[in-house]
Image: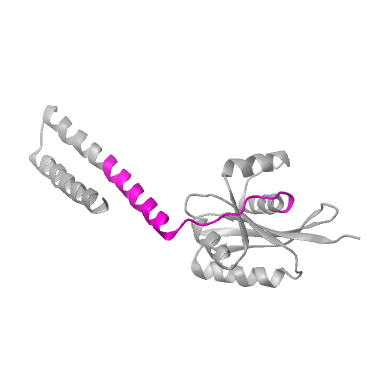
Amino acid sequence: MKVNLKYSVGTDISKQEFEACISVITNEQDVIVKARRKFNNSNEGIGYFLVWIKKHLKEEIPVVFTMEATGVYYEKLALALFENDYYVSVVLPNKSKKYMQSLGLKSKNDKIDAQGLSRMGAEQKLTRWMPFSKNIYQLRLLTRQNEDLQKQRTAMLNRKEAGKFSQYTNKLVGKQLGSMLKLIDKQIQQVK
């Protein structure tokens, strides 16, 4: 007799939306897809997703959520699931890609990826994701902003320097580059 052991929900996430696939693994190691649906990657879409999940998780068995670390697009959903006391695993894209290749899945689209992530979560014991503190997320934003500003500053300095040696110069361009450098320097000081 087949007995369901664990629900697994795979989510393939992009900036605008995410595809979700609910599977269950049995004591005979069969992974059976129970439901799938697409949601907006927004607070409202995540709210609908949480309601949809509760509707489909009918048995009192463990449930895991598996998603890829896709830039920052996964973070809102992962945090919402974590705050609702769900077990969330965030895997590196190359790990899930290798897993799906091992299954012989060569096609790639949102439905296939969500189903592959769902199966991966059902078959494997993946590490539980824990969010960073709010301060760490803030520090990451500031660090990235500082890095971008430094790159822009270097590009402006290079353009200003090159302008001094070009065959023709333009006072307006030189003045604008100087203004942009002052603004970037001011923003770098604010970030620090």
The secondary structure that dominates the magenta segment is helix
- Location of residue 23 in the rendering, given as x and y in whole percent from the top left corner: 73, 58
Q: Residue furthest right?
A: 1
Check residue 124 for magenta coloring: yes
Which is more toward the observer, 46 or 5?
Answer: 5
Magenta span: 122-151
Q: Quadrant of residue 152?
A: top left
- Location of residue 27 in the rendering, given as x and y in whole percent from the top left corner: 84, 56
Which is more toward the observer, 111 or 91?
Answer: 91
In the depicted structure, whether residue 155 falls above or below residue 48: above
Q: Quadrant of the N terminus?
A: bottom right
The residue at the point 10 percent across, 43 percent down is 175
Which is more toward the observer, 99 or 141?
Answer: 141
Side of 2 relative to 9 (left or right):
right
The residue at the point 65 percent across, 39 percent down is 98
Q: Residue furthest left?
A: 171
Check residue 99 for magenta coloring: no
Side of 155 relative to 29 (left or right):
left
Q: Quadrant of residue 170?
A: top left
- Location of residue 74 in the rendering, given as x and y in whole percent from the top left corner: 52, 56
In the depicted structure, whether residue 132 falls above or below residue 179: below
- Location of residue 40 in the rendering, given as x and y in whole percent from the top left corner: 53, 64
